[in-house]
Image (cartoon, rainbow, N blue to C red):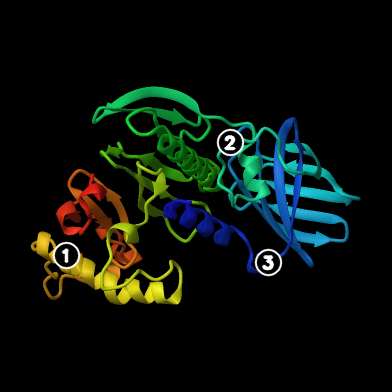
Amino acid sequence: MHPSSARLLAATALALAPSSARAAPEQLYEGIVGTARVVMTLAVDKADASGQYFYLRSRLDIDLSGRIRGQTLDLESRVTGDKLHLTRSGATLSGTLTTAKAQRLPVSLRPAGAPEKLPADLPPKLSVYERWHLAGLQFTAQQTETINGKTIRWYREPLSGIRLFRIESGYPAPALTAVNHALARNQWQDVSAWFACTGYEGGPGTDTAEAKRPWLGTRHVSYVWNASWSCAGAAHPDFGTTGYSFDMRTGRILKLDDLLRFGTGPVPAEESDAWYSYRGKRFAPGVVALLKRYHPQEMLKPAEGDDDGCDYSDPDVWDFPGWALSEKGLWLGAYFARVQRACDAPDWAVIPWSALGLKPGERP
């Protein structure tokens, strides 16, 4: 999952789910509201219920929360103002939905199983509800483009408008197959994140979700994904910039520790306590030292009293940076606390290939 997508999904879930219901088991339903098909998930905890649903025609999540009295559920959406009055009969739910404009629609819901007609190359960790979001959808092939003598083709998912490329020529066939599968998974993950973020008036809450033109080197491919969003119920708008890079000899997804490491010995296992310690104590100070060497002016500490200045000399903003590859070298994206997020991901923060200590065959 893209880190920006992960933050988007997590922020939406935490904002819309009451704390008492977050750990409750979810029940999945499908059915009809009026004449429109819907899918709904509900988590019930004693007398409280929370969840979300979507219309298959739009797929955007609509939040729900409310109370249970016996076999009766009264639910409301803070985003749309929809109110549902449902009665449980065995495994089914039926009743009415009243819109914010006082239109009353009949509701009929039954337990839902796994969806059919799922696209290929879905991310493996999607929930059943998230898979329903994507059931029956497909990408539409668009224009081709030639970059450094290699051909890419763009693909678009029509409901969300999310676009991403596939590589059609210029690299060994096994690597092309592996990388294109990974690109498809990335694209479906971003489509899923788009559906999960509904704005304050019920429309899309994602403002930007797009890939920059990729860099296609001799042995590497890299692209940057930009996203910004304002999901209803979240504390504030947010944004993220994430880079993705591939070794085109093997088709393997590259990690930053493959390209940039400090100290002697191997880098500790990712997500281990030793790895977090390494990132803070060795990696981040090492990045600051390199950037001061190649970008001395940009790395100057802001003048005393300049509260709006971006202090790129602070190692804390470099311990878990975004990153991508380019003709010039390795770009690193600093990550600041919320009050200084405008300082994030400066374009100039590039470490040249010659400084990475790679063998000749590992360079672009």
**On screen, 93 above or below 170?**
below
- Residue at 45%, 72% (x, y): give it: 272
Residue that carries the numbered disc 2 in the rendered image: 120
**Disc on the earlier residue, 3 or 1:** 3
Q: Amino acid at mark 3?
A: Ala
Real-space Cα separation, disc 2 to disc 1, in angstroms: 42 Å
Q: Amino acid at mark 1?
A: Leu
**Disc on the earlier residue, 3 or 2:** 3
Observer-nearest of 148 and 40:
148
Horizontal side of residue 83 vs 206, given as left or right? right
Task: Measuring from the top left, give residue 34's x and y in whole percent.
Answer: 75, 33
Task: Measuring from the top left, give residue 143's x and y in whole percent.
Answer: 37, 22
Secondary structure under badge 3? loop
- Residue at 49%, 39% (x, y): give it: 181
Secondary structure under badge 1? helix
**Disc on the earlier residue, 2 or 1:** 2
Real-space Cα separation, disc 3 to disc 1, in angstroms: 45 Å
The mark closer to the camera, 3 or 1, is 1
Circle number at residue 290: 1
Q: Is residue 100 something one can see in this rendering? A: no
Residue that carries the numbered disc 3 in the rendered image: 23
Observer-nearest of 31 and 356:
356
Asked if the residue at tag 1 contacts the one at tag 2, i.e. Cβ–Cβ closer than 8 Å, the answer is: no
Q: Is residue 243 something one can see in this rendering? A: yes
Q: Amino acid at mark 2?
A: Ala
